[in-house]
Image (cartoon, rainbow, N blue to C red):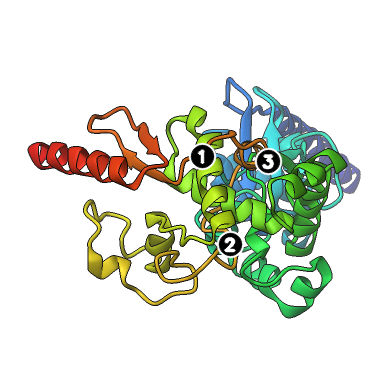
Amino acid sequence: MIKKIGIGVFILALVVAALNYETITGWLFSAKTINTTEARLLIKEDPTVEELVDILHAKEIISDKEEAISIAQDLQLKDDELEGGKYIIAPKGKIKDVLLGFKRGEDGKGRDEVLVNVIFNTCRDLNDVAKSVSVCIAADSASLFDYMVAPETLSKYGFTREQMPAIILPKQYEMEFDTNAEDFLAFMASKFKEFWTEERMQKLRLVGLSSQSQAVTVASIVYSEQGKVQDEWPIIAGLYLNRVKKGMKLKSDPTFKFCWGHELDNVQVLTGKHRDIDCPYNTYKINGLPPGPICITPAKVVDAVLNRADVDYIYMCAKPDYSGEHNFTASDTQHIKNAKAYQKWIRTQI
């Protein structure tokens, strides 16, 4: 009799324990996130469970890390099951579903892996491109840069290292987060090919240029000379193309500034010392065009080159005001007058 009671008590205890476990588990599994708006996460590397919980807590998606860890344990979630990526976390969702959503190969729930916006509008060179793009996609800056300048890559796309920046037409693009260096450049090459239609190729020949990289090189000089007043782009393009046709040195200040890398970024007054640097990009030293672009140039500036203004100008000088505009002329005498007027004005501003 005592034995039977003991067995009954033991069975009852198991039932109570099971009910308590189900109650606790049910409560845990019903716990929700605290974010009231859609939250976006960019996780570059595969996280551990603890790292994921730390991220969710830091981004104010969950309030209780211990609770989330307990839920992960009940789900038997393992570190090697989790995957980095771009995620969208809906507001007030179940923490259980959020955690499960980070499992490798899982769709929906907490994870909504989406296309990422890739923006690189103000880049000087491929190194800057690599740094900007690596913030948006999984590929790191070193792998991006190394791939873009690798001899095999240059051979594949038919560019020299100096010409390769011409393939990058900057704007906002959508790419998969897990895009690697090879896929990134293939994507940019496809956009380059789309841009260079037969109509644009005909215009290229009409303005006296022999390759797309030459057009982008001229555009990069135009863009570096005038980043404020877009209406001047076709005029400046016409001016430099006139100088090329006449066999004149371009004498563009941004080209010798490019030779100094980032050393002159905060220098307000450029001097003869800066201008006299020996460098294949310095158009005060070389004849014709530099070997490649001096900045990553938007497509609309390239179009300004292809649709150059029909002008006879060969000189330009900044106007003596803060408009950002230039005085243009075909006369060296008038250019000297324009330069003196600007120099006189600038001295009064110091």
Instruction: Give the amino acid at mark 1.
Output: Asp
Residue behind mark 2: 126
124 left or right of 309 in image: left
14 left or right of 88 in image: right
Q: Earlier in the sequence, mark 1 or mark 3?
A: 3
Residue 238 x %, y %: 55, 41
Q: Earlier in the sequence, mark 3 or mark 2?
A: 2
Q: Which of these two is toward me, 210 or 291?
A: 210
**Residue sitting at x 62%, y 35%:** 40
Could you tell me which secondary element the residue under label 1 belongs to? loop
Residue behind mark 1: 312
Number of other residues with Cα within 10 Å of mark 2, as a class: few under 14, some 14 to 19, many 20 or more: many
**Residue sitting at x 61%, y 31%:** 39
Could you tell me which secondary element the residue under label 2 belongs to? helix
Q: Nearer the viewer, mark 2 or mark 1?
A: 1
Q: Nearer the viewer, mark 3 or mark 2?
A: 3
Residue 306 marker: 3
Classify the position of the N terminus by image quarter.
Answer: top right
The correct choice, above or below, for 190 with respect to 79 in the image is: above
Q: Earlier in the sequence, mark 2 or mark 1?
A: 2
Q: Quadrant of residue 141?
A: bottom right
